[in-house]
């Protein structure tokens, strides 16, 4: 009867939450406003966790990190036009980094938008999102909400993961429709088994190796095949190099780690196995002089178009990392892979020399502090807190922290990633705390912190166990540049006198001010013990730090000096 069907009809918001819940979504990161406020309320009513941010970009980065950490798409909710566009930075960053996330955005009246008649927050969002997303969909009737959410989920996590955009116009969210069971996506990220001949080809090449090298990337960390990957590395006896977010997949103190002999192994390896790592700028595109011109490559990846992007891949293995690593391990066990003993010896010698050199820097007696001595203090404290997830961004702060802070467990380091982007820190830190319940230490350059600094209010509001450490050297790169042309500060200069610790006090968190390594260590120990929101203002000499950190070859002057 008519009354029965009326009582079965619900609004679009409810249908969206039904579809998300049916597919296991339990957390939404976002910023509310017209037209999505009721969607967030409905989600909360239904027992989902909604975390409200101060800016959509940080909410989007949080959703992307949640996707990386859980293997399920992280959800970011944004309002129309400007809120949507703020979120698109994170959507694009997720796509580039292969993190599964879905940006769900409300949008304005299509009839007005499409005729450009001037609506509130008018923008053709679907078209705007498309170039930055792995997939982009719009739902134009409430009956199709379940299908739209389901498609977004599968697109985000299947194959090479990425960012998906889902556009929900205001009238669809407020329309009423029959409540029917939403589609439950079966096996959203199916296994993809590699072809046996591709595995045999890879092992045949590995058998010819005298100086093999395994490079582990964040694709390998994402795949959650931790045990199999460890067995594979150990069965080959080859040194491995973790990319920054793959640190901890095997612990950094594993005897086969060649992280401290990076230049040597890149230059001298004769057969390289890339496991969920791309030969992009982070690996100097696999080119000489960084790499040997004679190196031969095996690559495990889920995306066939990735092969041969920079160097010819002699043995491509197409499949998901868990399946490919397992198949390779079985074949390796039947094979004869025999690195020459000198290879191990050379690497050990190089590691010893580099560790010794680094140790002198870490224990230098310098006031004010430089990056190395402050990071040594952090390293020593984190050695007793190996469950902590480390987030890192900045230029010098990022580069030095990557080398100095060891990681002991998989997916325990999140950083600036494939783009080397700033502004991810607080969003990643919040998601890490929310998704894992583990303590989080965000090691931030002062400039990097500024991009998402207001999210410390979010950290305090949700009482998350996040410690932010701001490396305050008063500048982008460094803080001592002089502008000889006017009274304005130079482009790289920030206020070195800033007391970042007082910011978090405004929101009820604990602030620490640290001028020596002993201060840093005491502050971090205390913050980790209380597991409450904290910020350590870590005063660094403005005269230390190099332009662009380790990326000096991208600077104009350095380029011009090249022969
Ligand atoms: P890094 O920056 O750590 O070197 P990249 O992000 O460049 O790592 O590379 C990750 C690679 O891993 C991408 O080419 C992606 O296609 C691949 N990848 C991501 N997830 C999987 C998976 N589950 N199985 C196989 N390959 C994957």
Image (tube, helix red, strand yellow):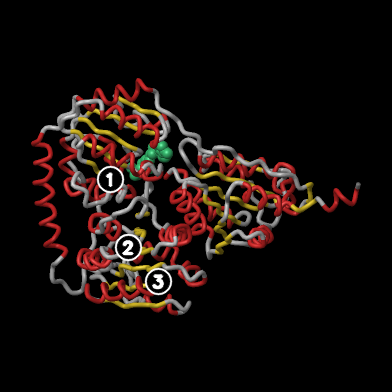
Give me the C-alpha separation between circle 1 and circle 3.
29 Å
The residue that disc 1 covers is: 242
Is 392 situated above or below 419? below
Q: Nearer the viewer, residue 70 or 30?
A: 70
Residue 6 shown left or right of residue 366 in the figure: right
Q: Is residue 294 visible?
A: no
Q: Residue at x 13, y 43 (%)?
A: 347
Find residue 476 and name its label. Answer: 2
Give the foreground label among 1 and 3.
3
Residue 64 shown left or right of residue 534 in the figure: right
**Which is nearer the N-term, disc 3 or disc 2?**
2
Indicate the quadrant of ligand 1 in the picture: top left
Write down the quadrant of residue 537 in the picture: bottom left
Residue 501 is situated, as x and y percent measured from the top left of the image, at 37, 76
Residue 284 is situated, as x and y percent measured from the top left of the image, at 27, 40
Find residue 42 and name its label. Answer: none
Residue 265 shown left or right of residue 528 in the figure: left
């Amino acid at each position: 009867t008519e009354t029965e069907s009326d009582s079965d009809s619900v609004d679009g918001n409810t249908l969206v939450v039904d579809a998300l819940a049916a597919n296991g979504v339990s957390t939404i990161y976002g910023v509310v406003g017209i037209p999505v406020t009721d969607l967030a309320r409905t989600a909360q009513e239904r027992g989902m966790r909604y975390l409200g941010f101060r800016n959509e970009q940080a909410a989007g980065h949080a959703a992307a990190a949640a996707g990386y950490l859980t293997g399920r798409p992280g959800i970011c909710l944004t309002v129309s036009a400007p809120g949507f566009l703020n979120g698109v930075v994170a959507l694009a960053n997720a796509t580039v980094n292969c993190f599964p996330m879905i940006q769900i955005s409300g949008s304005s009246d299509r009839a007005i938008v499409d005729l450009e008649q001037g609506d509130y927050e008018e923008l053709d969002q679907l078209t705007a999102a498309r170039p930055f997303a792995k997939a982009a969909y719009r739902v134009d009737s409430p009956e199709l909400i379940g299908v739209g959410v389901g498609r977004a989920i599968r697109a985000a996590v299947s194959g090479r993961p990425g960012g998906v955009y889902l556009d929900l116009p205001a009238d669809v969210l407020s329309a009423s429709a029959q409540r029917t069971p939403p589609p439950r996506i079966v096996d959203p990220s199916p296994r993809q088994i590699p072809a046996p001949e591709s595995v045999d080809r890879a092992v045949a090449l590995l058998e010819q190796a005298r100086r093999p090298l395994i490079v582990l990337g964040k694709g390998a960390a994402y795949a959650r095949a931790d045990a199999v990957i460890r067995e594979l590395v150990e069965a080959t006896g080859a040194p491995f190099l973790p990319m920054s977010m793959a640190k901890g997949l095997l612990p950094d103190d594993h005897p086969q780690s060649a992280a401290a002999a990076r230049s040597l192994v890149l230059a001298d390896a004769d057969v390289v196995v890339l496991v969920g790592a791309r030969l992009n700028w982070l690996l100097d595109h696999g080119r000489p002089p960084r790499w040997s011109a004679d190196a031969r490559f095996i690559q495990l990846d889920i995306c066939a178009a990735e092969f041969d992007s920079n160097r010819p891949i002699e043995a491509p293995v197409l499949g998901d990392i868990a399946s490919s690593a397992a198949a390779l391990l079985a074949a390796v066990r039947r094979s004869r892979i025999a690195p020459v003993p000198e290879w191990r010896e050379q690497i050990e010698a190089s590691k010893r020399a580099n560790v010794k050199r680094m140790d002198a820097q870490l224990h230098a007696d310098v006031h004010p502090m430089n990056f190395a001595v402050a990071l040594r203090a952090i390293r020593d404290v984190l050695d007793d807190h190996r469950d902590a997830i480390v987030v890192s961004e900045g230029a010098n702060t990022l580069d030095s922290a990557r080398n100095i802070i060891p990681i002991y467990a998989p997916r325990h380091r999140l950083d600036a990633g494939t783009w080397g982007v700033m502004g991810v820190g607080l969003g990643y830190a919040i998601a890490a705390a929310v998704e894992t319940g583990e303590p989080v230490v965000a090691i931030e350059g002062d400039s990097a912190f500024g991009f998402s600094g207001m999210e410390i209010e979010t950290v305090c509001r949700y009482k998350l166990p996040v410690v932010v450490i701001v490396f305050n050297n008063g500048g982008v790169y460094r803080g001592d540049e002089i502008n000889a042309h006017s009274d304005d500060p130079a482009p790289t200069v920030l206020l070195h006198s800033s007391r970042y610790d007082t910011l978090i006090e405004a929101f009820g968190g604990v602030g620490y001010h640290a001028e020596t390594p002993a201060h840093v260590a005491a502050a971090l120990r205390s913050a980790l013990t209380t597991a409450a929101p904290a910020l350590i203002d870590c005063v660094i000499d403005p005269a230390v730090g190099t332009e662009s950190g380790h990326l000096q070859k991208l600077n104009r002057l350095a380029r011009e000096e090249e022969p």
